[in-house]
Image (cartoon, rainbow, N blue to C red):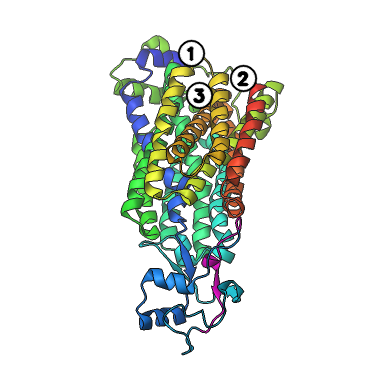
Protein backbone atom coordinates (compact mmCIF):
# COMPACT_ATOMS: atom_id res chain seq x y z
CA UNK A 1 0.00 0.00 0.00
CA UNK A 2 1.25 3.55 -0.76
CA UNK A 3 2.30 6.06 1.84
CA UNK A 4 1.20 9.70 1.96
CA UNK A 5 4.46 10.80 0.31
CA UNK A 6 3.82 8.40 -2.58
CA UNK A 7 0.34 9.85 -3.11
CA UNK A 8 1.59 13.45 -2.90
CA UNK A 9 3.98 12.73 -5.76
CA UNK A 10 0.89 12.16 -7.95
CA UNK A 11 -1.48 14.84 -6.62
CA UNK A 12 1.12 17.55 -5.99
CA UNK A 13 3.79 17.94 -3.32
CA UNK A 14 3.55 21.75 -3.25
CA UNK A 15 0.72 22.89 -5.48
CA UNK A 16 -2.24 25.20 -4.96
CA UNK A 17 -3.55 23.56 -1.77
CA UNK A 18 -0.16 23.49 -0.05
CA UNK A 19 0.64 27.06 -1.10
CA UNK A 20 -2.70 28.30 0.18
CA UNK A 21 -2.31 26.46 3.47
CA UNK A 22 1.24 27.70 3.83
CA UNK A 23 0.05 31.30 3.39
CA UNK A 24 -2.60 30.86 6.09
CA UNK A 25 -0.19 29.30 8.57
CA UNK A 26 2.56 31.81 7.74
CA UNK A 27 0.22 34.56 8.97
CA UNK A 28 -0.03 32.65 12.23
CA UNK A 29 3.77 32.54 12.43
CA UNK A 30 4.07 36.30 11.88
CA UNK A 31 1.43 36.99 14.54
CA UNK A 32 3.50 35.13 17.15
CA UNK A 33 6.24 37.80 17.01
CA UNK A 34 4.69 40.34 19.45
CA UNK A 35 4.37 37.67 22.12
CA UNK A 36 7.90 36.34 21.75
CA UNK A 37 9.87 39.60 21.55
CA UNK A 38 7.24 42.28 22.19
CA UNK A 39 8.92 43.02 25.52
CA UNK A 40 11.30 45.34 23.61
CA UNK A 41 8.44 47.79 23.01
CA UNK A 42 5.92 46.86 25.71
CA UNK A 43 8.64 47.04 28.37
CA UNK A 44 10.69 49.91 26.93
CA UNK A 45 12.70 51.64 29.69
CA UNK A 46 13.04 55.38 28.96
CA UNK A 47 15.33 57.78 30.79
CA UNK A 48 13.76 58.64 34.14
CA UNK A 49 14.35 60.56 37.36
CA UNK A 50 12.64 61.02 40.70
CA UNK A 51 9.52 63.14 40.69
CA UNK A 52 9.61 66.00 43.21
CA UNK A 53 6.69 68.44 43.55
CA UNK A 54 8.99 70.97 45.23
CA UNK A 55 11.43 70.91 42.31
CA UNK A 56 8.60 71.44 39.82
CA UNK A 57 7.37 74.48 41.75
CA UNK A 58 10.87 75.97 42.07
CA UNK A 59 11.49 75.42 38.36
CA UNK A 60 8.31 77.31 37.46
CA UNK A 61 9.19 80.15 39.85
CA UNK A 62 12.71 80.50 38.46
CA UNK A 63 11.78 79.92 34.83
CA UNK A 64 14.35 77.15 34.35
CA UNK A 65 14.71 75.22 31.15
CA UNK A 66 14.63 71.42 31.39
CA UNK A 67 18.41 71.32 31.06
CA UNK A 68 18.84 73.79 33.93
CA UNK A 69 16.38 71.90 36.12
CA UNK A 70 18.26 68.64 35.61
CA UNK A 71 21.63 70.29 36.20
CA UNK A 72 20.56 71.96 39.43
CA UNK A 73 18.36 69.31 41.05
CA UNK A 74 19.23 65.80 39.81
CA UNK A 75 22.22 63.81 41.17
CA UNK A 76 24.97 63.07 38.67
CA UNK A 77 26.30 59.68 37.56
CA UNK A 78 27.63 57.34 40.22
CA UNK A 79 30.91 55.41 40.21
CA UNK A 80 31.75 53.35 37.12
CA UNK A 81 29.92 50.04 37.04
CA UNK A 82 27.06 51.22 39.27
CA UNK A 83 23.56 52.35 38.44
CA UNK A 84 23.04 56.06 37.92
CA UNK A 85 21.76 57.79 41.07
CA UNK A 86 19.92 60.28 38.86
CA UNK A 87 17.44 57.51 38.01
CA UNK A 88 16.71 56.02 41.42
CA UNK A 89 17.85 58.53 44.05
CA UNK A 90 17.12 62.14 44.91
CA UNK A 91 18.67 64.82 47.07
CA UNK A 92 17.05 64.82 50.51
CA UNK A 93 16.40 68.53 50.39
CA UNK A 94 13.33 70.57 51.25
CA UNK A 95 12.85 72.28 47.92
CA UNK A 96 10.09 74.48 49.32
CA UNK A 97 12.35 76.44 51.68
CA UNK A 98 12.62 80.09 50.76
CA UNK A 99 16.42 80.17 51.17
CA UNK A 100 16.95 78.36 47.89
CA UNK A 101 17.89 80.68 45.03
CA UNK A 102 17.42 80.31 41.33
CA UNK A 103 21.12 80.09 40.46
CA UNK A 104 22.67 76.84 41.72
CA UNK A 105 20.22 76.53 44.66
CA UNK A 106 22.22 73.75 46.35
CA UNK A 107 25.43 75.80 46.61
CA UNK A 108 24.33 77.30 49.94
CA UNK A 109 23.68 73.87 51.47
CA UNK A 110 27.01 72.20 50.70
CA UNK A 111 30.25 73.19 49.02
CA UNK A 112 30.21 69.89 47.12
CA UNK A 113 26.95 68.29 46.05
CA UNK A 114 28.41 64.83 46.61
CA UNK A 115 28.23 65.56 50.35
CA UNK A 116 24.47 66.02 50.28
CA UNK A 117 22.44 63.02 51.49
CA UNK A 118 20.61 60.95 48.89
CA UNK A 119 17.37 59.04 49.40
CA UNK A 120 14.97 56.87 47.38
CA UNK A 121 12.22 58.36 45.22
CA UNK A 122 9.06 59.02 47.24
CA UNK A 123 6.70 60.56 44.69
CA UNK A 124 7.26 58.31 41.70
CA UNK A 125 9.27 59.08 38.59
CA UNK A 126 9.30 61.40 35.61
CA UNK A 127 9.84 59.56 32.30
CA UNK A 128 11.36 61.21 29.24
CA UNK A 129 9.16 59.63 26.59
CA UNK A 130 6.17 60.82 24.54
CA UNK A 131 4.51 57.39 24.77
CA UNK A 132 4.00 54.80 27.48
CA UNK A 133 5.06 51.28 28.34
CA UNK A 134 4.30 48.87 31.15
CA UNK A 135 7.44 50.29 32.79
CA UNK A 136 6.13 53.86 32.86
CA UNK A 137 2.56 52.93 33.81
CA UNK A 138 3.40 50.54 36.65
CA UNK A 139 6.76 52.14 37.64
CA UNK A 140 8.83 49.02 36.98
CA UNK A 141 12.14 50.75 37.67
CA UNK A 142 14.73 50.90 40.44
CA UNK A 143 13.49 48.73 43.32
CA UNK A 144 10.67 47.35 41.16
CA UNK A 145 12.80 46.61 38.08
CA UNK A 146 12.68 42.86 38.82
CA UNK A 147 8.98 42.97 37.98
CA UNK A 148 9.85 43.63 34.33
CA UNK A 149 12.08 40.56 34.35
CA UNK A 150 9.20 38.58 35.86
CA UNK A 151 6.82 39.80 33.15
CA UNK A 152 8.97 38.34 30.37
CA UNK A 153 9.80 35.23 32.37
CA UNK A 154 6.08 34.58 32.92
CA UNK A 155 5.39 34.24 29.21
CA UNK A 156 8.29 31.77 28.93
CA UNK A 157 6.93 29.79 31.88
CA UNK A 158 3.71 29.60 29.88
CA UNK A 159 5.65 28.45 26.82
CA UNK A 160 7.25 25.70 28.87
CA UNK A 161 4.07 24.34 30.46
CA UNK A 162 2.06 24.72 27.26
CA UNK A 163 4.65 22.87 25.19
CA UNK A 164 4.47 19.87 27.51
CA UNK A 165 0.69 19.71 27.81
CA UNK A 166 -0.57 20.86 24.42
CA UNK A 167 2.09 18.87 22.58
CA UNK A 168 0.72 15.69 24.11
CA UNK A 169 -2.88 16.72 23.37
CA UNK A 170 -2.06 17.55 19.73
CA UNK A 171 -0.54 14.12 19.15
CA UNK A 172 -3.41 12.42 20.99
CA UNK A 173 -6.46 14.34 19.74
CA UNK A 174 -5.26 16.03 16.55
CA UNK A 175 -3.43 19.09 15.29
CA UNK A 176 -6.42 21.09 14.06
CA UNK A 177 -8.45 20.95 17.27
CA UNK A 178 -5.51 22.11 19.38
CA UNK A 179 -4.62 24.83 16.89
CA UNK A 180 -8.09 26.37 17.06
CA UNK A 181 -8.21 26.17 20.86
CA UNK A 182 -4.83 27.86 21.24
CA UNK A 183 -5.84 30.62 18.79
CA UNK A 184 -9.02 31.41 20.73
CA UNK A 185 -7.37 31.47 24.16
CA UNK A 186 -4.41 33.48 22.86
CA UNK A 187 -6.62 36.15 21.30
CA UNK A 188 -8.91 36.48 24.33
CA UNK A 189 -6.08 36.69 26.86
CA UNK A 190 -4.22 39.22 24.69
CA UNK A 191 -7.21 41.57 24.66
CA UNK A 192 -7.71 41.14 28.41
CA UNK A 193 -4.05 41.97 28.98
CA UNK A 194 -4.46 45.21 27.01
CA UNK A 195 -7.22 46.36 29.39
CA UNK A 196 -5.72 45.02 32.62
CA UNK A 197 -6.06 47.55 35.45
CA UNK A 198 -3.14 46.27 37.53
CA UNK A 199 0.27 44.70 37.06
CA UNK A 200 -0.95 41.44 38.63
CA UNK A 201 -3.77 40.97 36.14
CA UNK A 202 -1.49 41.89 33.27
CA UNK A 203 1.00 39.25 34.43
CA UNK A 204 -1.73 36.58 34.68
CA UNK A 205 -3.02 37.19 31.15
CA UNK A 206 0.53 37.27 29.76
CA UNK A 207 1.14 33.90 31.38
CA UNK A 208 -2.03 32.52 29.76
CA UNK A 209 -0.86 33.82 26.39
CA UNK A 210 2.39 31.97 26.90
CA UNK A 211 0.55 28.74 27.70
CA UNK A 212 -1.04 28.58 24.26
CA UNK A 213 0.74 30.88 21.79
CA UNK A 214 4.02 29.05 21.23
CA UNK A 215 2.27 25.68 21.16
CA UNK A 216 -0.02 27.07 18.45
CA UNK A 217 2.97 28.33 16.46
CA UNK A 218 4.67 24.94 16.61
CA UNK A 219 1.47 23.08 15.72
CA UNK A 220 1.26 25.27 12.63
CA UNK A 221 4.85 24.34 11.83
CA UNK A 222 4.09 20.64 12.18
CA UNK A 223 0.93 20.95 10.05
CA UNK A 224 2.58 22.61 7.08
CA UNK A 225 5.50 20.16 7.06
CA UNK A 226 3.03 17.25 7.09
CA UNK A 227 0.94 18.63 4.21
CA UNK A 228 3.82 18.93 1.73
CA UNK A 229 5.93 16.29 0.02
CA UNK A 230 9.23 15.15 1.40
CA UNK A 231 11.32 17.21 -1.03
CA UNK A 232 9.60 20.45 0.05
CA UNK A 233 9.46 19.83 3.79
CA UNK A 234 12.72 21.59 4.64
CA UNK A 235 12.01 24.61 2.46
CA UNK A 236 8.53 25.30 3.84
CA UNK A 237 9.85 24.78 7.36
CA UNK A 238 12.46 27.48 6.79
CA UNK A 239 10.06 29.90 5.12
CA UNK A 240 7.57 29.37 7.93
CA UNK A 241 10.24 30.84 10.18
CA UNK A 242 10.92 33.59 7.63
CA UNK A 243 7.30 34.61 8.17
CA UNK A 244 8.24 35.18 11.81
CA UNK A 245 10.96 37.55 10.58
CA UNK A 246 8.38 39.42 8.50
CA UNK A 247 6.41 39.75 11.73
CA UNK A 248 9.45 41.41 13.32
CA UNK A 249 9.51 44.08 10.62
CA UNK A 250 5.78 44.70 10.91
CA UNK A 251 6.02 44.89 14.70
CA UNK A 252 8.70 47.60 14.48
CA UNK A 253 6.48 49.71 12.23
CA UNK A 254 3.32 49.23 14.31
CA UNK A 255 5.21 50.01 17.53
CA UNK A 256 6.57 53.21 15.96
CA UNK A 257 3.08 54.36 15.00
CA UNK A 258 1.56 53.31 18.35
CA UNK A 259 3.99 54.31 21.14
CA UNK A 260 1.39 53.59 23.84
CA UNK A 261 1.59 49.99 25.04
CA UNK A 262 -2.13 49.34 25.53
CA UNK A 263 -3.01 50.35 21.95
CA UNK A 264 -0.02 48.42 20.66
CA UNK A 265 -1.06 45.27 22.54
CA UNK A 266 -4.64 45.56 21.32
CA UNK A 267 -3.59 46.15 17.72
CA UNK A 268 -1.29 43.13 17.50
CA UNK A 269 -3.82 40.87 19.27
CA UNK A 270 -7.11 41.51 17.44
CA UNK A 271 -6.00 39.89 14.12
CA UNK A 272 -5.71 36.57 15.97
CA UNK A 273 -9.50 36.29 16.04
CA UNK A 274 -9.44 36.05 12.22
CA UNK A 275 -7.42 32.84 12.52
CA UNK A 276 -10.51 31.08 13.88
CA UNK A 277 -11.69 31.01 10.24
CA UNK A 278 -9.06 28.30 9.75
CA UNK A 279 -11.73 25.88 10.93
CA UNK A 280 -12.99 26.00 7.33
CA UNK A 281 -9.64 26.59 5.62
CA UNK A 282 -7.14 24.16 7.16
CA UNK A 283 -7.96 20.43 7.40
CA UNK A 284 -6.55 17.88 9.81
CA UNK A 285 -3.18 16.33 9.00
CA UNK A 286 -3.75 13.12 6.99
CA UNK A 287 -0.47 11.74 8.33
CA UNK A 288 -1.75 12.06 11.90
CA UNK A 289 -5.09 10.49 10.96
CA UNK A 290 -3.32 7.48 9.43
CA UNK A 291 -1.14 7.06 12.52
CA UNK A 292 -4.36 6.96 14.54
CA UNK A 293 -5.93 4.29 12.27
CA UNK A 294 -8.38 6.76 10.73
CA UNK A 295 -7.57 6.00 7.11
CA UNK A 296 -11.07 6.80 5.80
CA UNK A 297 -10.92 10.37 7.09
CA UNK A 298 -7.36 10.71 5.81
CA UNK A 299 -8.41 9.59 2.34
CA UNK A 300 -11.23 12.17 2.26
CA UNK A 301 -8.70 14.92 3.02
CA UNK A 302 -6.28 13.57 0.41
CA UNK A 303 -9.04 13.62 -2.21
CA UNK A 304 -9.79 17.21 -1.18
CA UNK A 305 -6.10 18.08 -1.67
CA UNK A 306 -6.10 16.41 -5.09
CA UNK A 307 -9.20 18.37 -6.12
CA UNK A 308 -7.67 21.66 -4.96
CA UNK A 309 -4.51 20.88 -6.91
CA UNK A 310 -6.48 19.99 -10.04
CA UNK A 311 -5.23 16.42 -10.01
CA UNK A 312 -7.03 13.07 -10.04
CA UNK A 313 -6.28 10.30 -7.58
CA UNK A 314 -5.66 6.93 -9.27
CA UNK A 315 -7.64 4.00 -7.87
CA UNK A 316 -4.40 2.18 -7.13
CA UNK A 317 -3.47 4.89 -4.63
CA UNK A 318 -6.76 4.95 -2.71
CA UNK A 319 -5.48 2.77 0.11
CA UNK A 320 -3.03 3.97 2.70
CA UNK A 321 -0.37 2.79 5.08
CA UNK A 322 1.45 4.78 7.77
CA UNK A 323 4.79 6.51 7.16
CA UNK A 324 6.14 4.15 9.84
CA UNK A 325 4.99 0.57 10.06
CA UNK A 326 2.91 0.02 13.18
CA UNK A 327 0.86 -2.89 14.40
CA UNK A 328 -1.72 -1.00 16.41
CA UNK A 329 -2.99 2.50 17.09
CA UNK A 330 -0.12 4.51 18.56
CA UNK A 331 -0.60 6.69 21.63
CA UNK A 332 2.43 8.93 22.18
CA UNK A 333 4.22 8.91 25.52
CA UNK A 334 7.03 11.01 27.01
CA UNK A 335 8.96 7.74 27.42
CA UNK A 336 9.02 7.38 23.63
CA UNK A 337 11.44 10.32 23.51
CA UNK A 338 14.09 8.38 25.48
CA UNK A 339 13.10 4.77 24.77
CA UNK A 340 16.00 3.86 22.46
CA UNK A 341 19.65 5.01 22.64
CA UNK A 342 19.43 6.81 19.29
CA UNK A 343 16.21 8.67 20.13
CA UNK A 344 17.59 9.46 23.59
CA UNK A 345 20.76 10.98 22.11
CA UNK A 346 18.72 13.06 19.68
CA UNK A 347 16.48 14.30 22.47
CA UNK A 348 19.34 15.39 24.76
CA UNK A 349 21.32 17.16 22.02
CA UNK A 350 18.24 18.96 20.70
CA UNK A 351 17.18 20.09 24.17
CA UNK A 352 20.60 21.63 24.85
CA UNK A 353 20.67 23.37 21.47
CA UNK A 354 17.19 24.79 21.98
CA UNK A 355 18.27 26.16 25.39
CA UNK A 356 21.41 27.96 24.22
CA UNK A 357 19.81 29.28 21.03
CA UNK A 358 16.95 30.81 22.99
CA UNK A 359 19.19 32.48 25.56
CA UNK A 360 21.29 34.13 22.87
CA UNK A 361 18.46 35.05 20.48
CA UNK A 362 16.22 36.63 23.09
CA UNK A 363 19.20 38.03 24.97
CA UNK A 364 20.59 39.89 21.95
CA UNK A 365 17.18 41.43 21.23
CA UNK A 366 16.73 42.55 24.85
CA UNK A 367 20.29 43.86 25.00
CA UNK A 368 19.69 45.84 21.82
CA UNK A 369 16.62 47.42 23.44
CA UNK A 370 18.80 48.66 26.30
CA UNK A 371 21.67 49.85 24.12
CA UNK A 372 20.10 51.29 21.00
CA UNK A 373 19.79 55.00 20.34
CA UNK A 374 16.72 54.53 18.13
CA UNK A 375 14.96 51.39 19.28
CA UNK A 376 12.64 51.20 16.27
CA UNK A 377 15.35 51.47 13.61
CA UNK A 378 17.73 49.19 15.52
CA UNK A 379 15.00 46.56 15.84
CA UNK A 380 14.10 46.89 12.14
CA UNK A 381 17.67 46.67 10.84
CA UNK A 382 18.59 43.75 13.08
CA UNK A 383 15.52 41.85 11.83
CA UNK A 384 16.58 42.36 8.20
CA UNK A 385 19.69 40.20 8.67
CA UNK A 386 17.47 37.21 9.43
CA UNK A 387 16.54 36.98 5.73
CA UNK A 388 20.06 36.14 4.48
CA UNK A 389 20.32 33.64 7.36
CA UNK A 390 17.34 31.73 5.95
CA UNK A 391 18.67 31.77 2.39
CA UNK A 392 22.09 30.56 3.52
CA UNK A 393 20.38 27.58 5.16
CA UNK A 394 18.43 26.80 1.98
CA UNK A 395 21.59 26.95 -0.13
CA UNK A 396 23.78 24.87 2.17
CA UNK A 397 21.63 22.33 3.98
CA UNK A 398 21.27 19.92 1.05
CA UNK A 399 24.74 20.49 -0.35
CA UNK A 400 26.77 20.42 2.86
CA UNK A 401 24.41 18.87 5.39
CA UNK A 402 23.33 20.11 8.77
CA UNK A 403 26.32 19.72 11.06
CA UNK A 404 28.81 22.11 9.44
CA UNK A 405 26.43 25.05 8.81
CA UNK A 406 25.04 24.53 12.31
CA UNK A 407 28.49 24.60 13.91
CA UNK A 408 29.57 27.58 11.76
CA UNK A 409 26.46 29.55 12.74
CA UNK A 410 27.18 28.98 16.43
CA UNK A 411 30.82 29.98 15.94
CA UNK A 412 29.90 33.23 14.18
CA UNK A 413 27.33 34.12 16.85
CA UNK A 414 29.74 33.52 19.73
CA UNK A 415 32.66 35.31 18.06
CA UNK A 416 30.49 38.33 17.23
CA UNK A 417 29.33 38.62 20.85
CA UNK A 418 32.89 38.49 22.14
CA UNK A 419 34.17 40.94 19.51
CA UNK A 420 31.46 43.46 20.40
CA UNK A 421 32.86 43.70 23.91
CA UNK A 422 36.21 45.03 22.69
CA UNK A 423 35.08 47.32 19.85
CA UNK A 424 35.31 51.01 20.91
CA UNK A 425 32.11 53.04 21.02
CA UNK A 426 33.38 55.47 18.36
CA UNK A 427 33.69 52.67 15.77
CA UNK A 428 29.95 52.53 15.32
CA UNK A 429 30.04 50.86 11.89
CA UNK A 430 32.14 48.01 13.25
CA UNK A 431 29.86 47.52 16.25
CA UNK A 432 26.83 47.43 13.97
CA UNK A 433 28.57 44.89 11.71
CA UNK A 434 29.43 42.64 14.65
CA UNK A 435 25.87 42.89 15.99
CA UNK A 436 24.40 41.96 12.60
CA UNK A 437 26.75 38.99 12.21
CA UNK A 438 25.82 37.78 15.70
CA UNK A 439 22.11 38.10 14.98
CA UNK A 440 22.49 36.31 11.64
CA UNK A 441 24.49 33.49 13.21
CA UNK A 442 22.07 32.81 16.04
CA UNK A 443 19.11 33.05 13.65
CA UNK A 444 20.68 30.33 11.48
CA UNK A 445 21.31 28.15 14.54
CA UNK A 446 17.78 28.70 15.83
CA UNK A 447 16.09 27.92 12.51
CA UNK A 448 18.22 24.83 11.95
CA UNK A 449 17.45 23.30 15.34
CA UNK A 450 13.74 23.77 14.64
CA UNK A 451 14.13 22.18 11.21
CA UNK A 452 16.22 19.22 12.38
CA UNK A 453 13.95 18.62 15.37
CA UNK A 454 10.96 17.87 13.13
CA UNK A 455 13.00 15.52 10.95
CA UNK A 456 14.39 13.27 13.68
CA UNK A 457 11.13 11.90 15.11
CA UNK A 458 8.54 9.52 13.63
CA UNK A 459 5.07 10.90 12.88
CA UNK A 460 3.24 9.61 15.95
CA UNK A 461 5.59 11.46 18.36
CA UNK A 462 6.78 14.25 16.04
CA UNK A 463 4.60 16.97 17.56
CA UNK A 464 5.41 15.80 21.09
CA UNK A 465 9.13 15.61 20.31
CA UNK A 466 9.28 19.12 18.86
CA UNK A 467 7.30 20.65 21.70
CA UNK A 468 9.15 18.87 24.51
CA UNK A 469 12.63 19.58 23.11
CA UNK A 470 11.74 23.18 22.32
CA UNK A 471 10.50 23.57 25.89
CA UNK A 472 14.16 23.92 26.85
CA UNK A 473 14.27 27.16 24.92
CA UNK A 474 11.51 28.28 27.28
CA UNK A 475 13.71 27.45 30.26
CA UNK A 476 16.34 29.64 28.63
CA UNK A 477 13.74 32.34 28.09
CA UNK A 478 12.79 32.26 31.77
CA UNK A 479 16.31 33.13 32.92
CA UNK A 480 17.26 35.44 30.01
CA UNK A 481 15.45 38.60 31.29
CA UNK A 482 17.13 38.32 34.69
CA UNK A 483 20.43 37.56 32.97
CA UNK A 484 20.30 40.55 30.61
CA UNK A 485 18.76 43.22 32.82
CA UNK A 486 20.72 42.37 35.97
CA UNK A 487 24.11 41.86 34.30
CA UNK A 488 23.71 45.04 32.29
CA UNK A 489 23.42 46.92 35.59
CA UNK A 490 26.89 45.63 36.54
CA UNK A 491 28.58 46.12 33.17
CA UNK A 492 26.77 46.88 29.94
CA UNK A 493 28.75 44.33 27.90
CA UNK A 494 28.72 41.53 30.49
CA UNK A 495 25.72 39.70 28.94
CA UNK A 496 27.66 39.41 25.67
CA UNK A 497 30.54 37.68 27.46
CA UNK A 498 28.10 35.17 28.98
CA UNK A 499 26.48 34.58 25.58
CA UNK A 500 29.89 33.84 24.05
CA UNK A 501 30.58 31.22 26.72
CA UNK A 502 27.22 29.54 26.07
CA UNK A 503 27.88 29.34 22.34
CA UNK A 504 31.37 27.90 22.96
CA UNK A 505 29.86 25.04 24.97
CA UNK A 506 27.21 24.53 22.31
CA UNK A 507 29.80 24.26 19.51
CA UNK A 508 31.62 21.56 21.46
CA UNK A 509 28.39 19.69 22.16
CA UNK A 510 27.09 19.95 18.60
CA UNK A 511 30.41 18.79 17.11
CA UNK A 512 29.99 15.47 18.92
CA UNK A 513 26.68 14.74 17.24
CA UNK A 514 26.37 12.99 13.90
CA UNK A 515 25.24 14.68 10.74
Question: Under tag 2, what secondary structure?
Answer: loop
Decide whether residue 86 is among the magenta residues: yes
The number of numbered badges drawn on the structure is: 3
Q: Residue furthest top?
A: 316
Task: State how far apart marks 3 and 2 are (Cα).
Answer: 12 Å
Q: Residue at x 41, y 49 (%)?
A: 375
Of circles 1 and 3, which is in front? 1
Instruction: Decide which of 312, 200 is in the foreground and name it.
Output: 200
Q: Where is residue 366 in the image (x, y as percent from the top left)?
A: 50, 47
Question: Under tag 3, what secondary structure?
Answer: helix
Determine which residue is flagged by label 3.
290
Instruction: Give residue 399's mark.
Output: 1
**Which badge, 1 or 3, is on the more N-terminal residue?**
3
Would residue 286 appear left or right of 145 to someone viewing this image?
A: left
> Dot 3: few (<14), some (14–19), or many (≥20) neighbours within 10 Å?
many
Task: State how far apart marks 1 and 3 are (Cα).
Answer: 32 Å
Amino acid sequence: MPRVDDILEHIGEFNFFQKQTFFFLALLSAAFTPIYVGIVFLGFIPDHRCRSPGVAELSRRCGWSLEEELNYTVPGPGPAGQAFPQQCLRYEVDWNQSALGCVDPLAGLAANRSHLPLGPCQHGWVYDTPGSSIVTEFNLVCGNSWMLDLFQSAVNVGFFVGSMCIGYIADRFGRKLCLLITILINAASGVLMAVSPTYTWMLIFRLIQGLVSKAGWLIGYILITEFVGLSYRRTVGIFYQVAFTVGLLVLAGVAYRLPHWRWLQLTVTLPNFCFLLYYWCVPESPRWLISQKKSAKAMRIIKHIAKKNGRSLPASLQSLRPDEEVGEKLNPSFLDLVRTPQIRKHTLILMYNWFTSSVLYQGLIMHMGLAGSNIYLDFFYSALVEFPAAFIIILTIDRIGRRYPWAAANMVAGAACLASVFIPEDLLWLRVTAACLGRMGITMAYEMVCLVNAELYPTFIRNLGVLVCSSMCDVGGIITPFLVYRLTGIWHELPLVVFDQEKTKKRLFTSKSRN
